[in-house]
Amino acid sequence: MATGNGWYLIGPLIAVGLVGFLGAVFWRMGLHWTFAREESMERYADGLAIFGEPDDYGLLYPAAVTDDPDVADEIRRLLGDAGIRATHAVDRDGRMAVLVFAEEVEEARRLVGGSPAL
């Protein structure tokens, strides 16, 4: 089954050309963001800033702020024992913020109000 004129190469050449064309179209559409410059990543290096503001934690609000990570874990466990979901985050200045949802902030602040960390 020998073909002497080389028409069997047309299919693979069309496929390679089509893939190259689609790659150029996607690149032009803006999918070159995967090669982001390091300068654009420097603005996120200042701690936990979800929306660009330093103290914006999205749906979470700080119930307590402390310098000691062990105290933050203790406060988080205390809130967990009371049925309040809590987490912690490192702030810009290195302090630990114990975060809870908005509907549980007042109760959480009452529970940790006597804490020596505050």
Image (cartoon, rainbow, N blue to C red):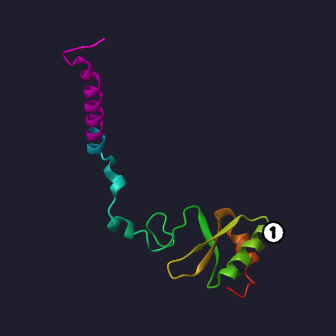
Looking at the magenta stretch, what is its main secondary structure? Answer: helix
Residue bearing the label numbered 1:
81
Query: Looking at the rendering, in which quadrant would you find the C terminus?
Result: bottom right
Q: How far across and down, in percent of the image, does residue 68 sit?
A: 65, 84
- Tag count: 1
Quadrant of res 3? top left
Q: Could you say which is closer to the camera, residue 69 or residue 112?
A: 69
> Eyeballing the image, is 14 above or below 88?
above
**Residue at the image point whose x is 76% and y is 68% from the top:** 80
Q: Which residues are magenta?
A: 1-24
The residue furthest top is 1
Task: For label 1, count other residues whose C-alpha is less than 10 Å away and answer few (under 14), some (14-19) or many (20+).
Answer: few
**Residue at the image point whose x is 20% and y is 15% from the top:** 4
**Magenta stretch encompasses residue 23:** yes
**Magenta stretch encompasses residue 59:** no
Tell me the kind of residue under disc 1: Asp
**Residue at the image point whose x is 60% and y is 69% from the top:** 61
The residue furthest bottom is 116
Q: How far across and down, in percent of the image, does residue 103 sit?
A: 68, 62
Query: Looking at the rendering, in which quadrant would you find the N terminus?
Result: top left
Left or right: where does residue 33 sit relative to residue 56? left
The residue furthest left is 5
**Residue at the image point whose x is 48% and y is 68% from the top:** 49
The residue furthest right is 81
Q: How far across and down, in percent of the image, does residue 115 sit?
A: 74, 84
Q: Secondary structure at mark 1?
A: helix
Quadrant of res 76? bottom right
> Eyeballing the image, is 75 above or below 34?
below
Left or right: where does residue 90 sit relative to residue 18? right
Left or right: where does residue 38 sit relative to residue 69? left
> Eyeballing the image, is 2 above or below 27?
above
Q: How far across and down, in percent of the image, does residue 40 sit?
A: 34, 65
